[in-house]
Image (cartoon, rainbow, N blue to C red):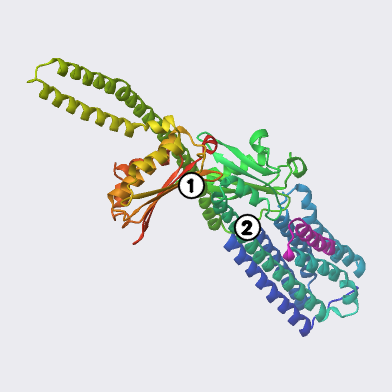
Amino acid sequence: MNSAPVLPSDTELAAAYLQLAVTLGLVVLCGILNRRYRRHYFGLWSLAWAVYSLRLLAIITFLITGAQAWLFWHQVATGWTAVAFLWAALVFAQRPEWRPAYSGLVFFPVIWAFVGIYLLDNFLLAAGPMIGFLSLTTAAAGAAFLRYDRLVGSPAGRFLAVVLFLWALHHLDYPLLRARGAWNPWGYYLDITFSIGVGLGIVFLVLEDLDQGLASLTALSGELQGGIASQEPVAEAMLRRALSLRGVHGSALWIATEDSGQFVQGAGVAALWPFEGAPETARQAVERVRREAVPSVARASRKGDATQEGHAYTAALPVLGEDEVVGAVVVVGEARDPFTVLDNRFLLAFGQQVGAALANEELNRDLISRTEELERLQSRMVHQHEEERARIWRELHDETAQVLAALNLQLGVIAERSDEASVPALERARTLLGEGIKSIRSVTRNLRPVALDDLGLIPAMRGLARDFHEPGTFEVDFEAPAQAPPLSGEAESAVYRAMQEGLANSVRHGARSGVSVRLVGNDTHAILEVEDDGPGFPEDTAIRLRSRGGLAGLRERVTALGGELSMINRTGAGAVVRVELPLQDRMLK
């Protein structure tokens, strides 16, 4: 090819050396990124820039020596550089698999460089196909980034697409500029500009991925905490948030079992995986995660393409327990995975957080279950306790008290028929027997107030207030609605006992003038307040609540019924015993 001889000059060599220095800098940059993030497309970019450097070395050597062999290798390296850039762009954006048909792109530059350099004499005919090949592959690399931008909304991908499209157009002006002698040095300067633009685009992609990846994992981390706080299942909150990541169309949670594992929940295109089974690619990804304990990314298999499986990639992040992989979070989509630039240490830390959140949720469920079981046991104990008190009350009231009353009558009959010497002893016996009957009646009244069964809650509470009321000494002010709130039998007994214990405490701890008792009801609870004007509760009240005294028993009774007991100590102004109990319809719910 002698129609366009190359005339070396100091200006052209200087421009070529400058371009070589810039290109070697880009080789180092992509090499550092590859070593830092362990992503092979950075290595492909570094390789592409290295081939570009060999192209420049070949043209520099040709300019110095004039040997056509170096021009041949310059043309070959030019084509290989374009292929390397295209493949790196495709691997970054879509992760394609290498196929034998792609080898034609590798062999074309070698074949046509030989034809153009050694067999053709026409400059345009020799350079045209190679220039067209270079322009098309560069534009195809731009199209890959443009498609990536459309899938995930990437400003950096859009920037790279624009730079590569402009570079592809610039390749087409080579015959015109070279033929007119204007290539030197402006063609080199334009190539340097586009090289720097591509390098900046790669850096922008890294920064963008870091920003998006960290933001995504931070949002997912927030969902882990927010799901617990809002009582939403952790898995559901996390998978819902994962669907908002760039390019993600489905997410699923895989839990390891002793033998293998299974998908337990999914969202988006993965919603049916727990029921219909996951694609082979997803199963392979989670098995690799379980085996190697590192994040895994895979393309859809050849047999089941992206359309059939509903996605183009599968990214699996390990969920870590204390010593092993306990599951995996799987996300699928049409672009590449959203965590591609984040290193494995960060992803593994996130997996540990997911594992801890799931473990905490399991512990929380167990705690709730045990708490509910304890509440049921307490409620059953209160119910059995009331039944036992009622049984003892019936035995004492209906049997023992009646027998003692009959015995008292018999002693009276005997006293009437006995001599005068026996009458004092019999009367003494009758007096002692009467005291015993009073004691039994007092016990039965404490076991089960008769008024509560016979008259209802409000009259029984009024009667209790009258029992404690002493005009001028201890005033009891009782306020209650005309109709009692709808409470169960155990709850009514608890309200009565709470009032009894509150009045007893007021008397015991020195109320100055009296007590105010109020019973009110709202839509959900019945509320009893016993307020006095005494010195307040002693400092050991909290200890007494942990003992087996009256307040401790009252708290257990109220808690077992789903209520709450609180004691407010008003310094210098008395104390308040407050009991809240759910209404009967609320307890049933």
Residue 352 x %, y %? 51, 51
Seen in the picture, residue 402 relative to 260 is either above or below; the reply is above
Residue 488 x %, y %? 48, 34
Residue 524 x %, y %? 54, 43
Viewer-nearest residue: 396 or 476? 476
The circle drawn on residue 216 is 2
Task: Find the magenta span and give its range.
Answer: 133-156
Q: Main secondary structure of the magenta part?
A: helix
Task: Left or right? Give the position of 47 relative to 324.
Answer: right
Q: Residues within 10 Å of mark 2 (few under 14, many from 20)?
A: some
The circle drawn on residue 571 is none
Seen in the picture, residue 517 relative to 451 is either above or below; the reply is below
> What element does badge 1 sit on?
helix
Distance (Cα) linking label 2 and label 1: 22 Å
Q: Of tags 2 and 1, which is closer to the observer?
A: 1
| Farthest bottom residue in view | 10
The circle drawn on residue 360 is 1
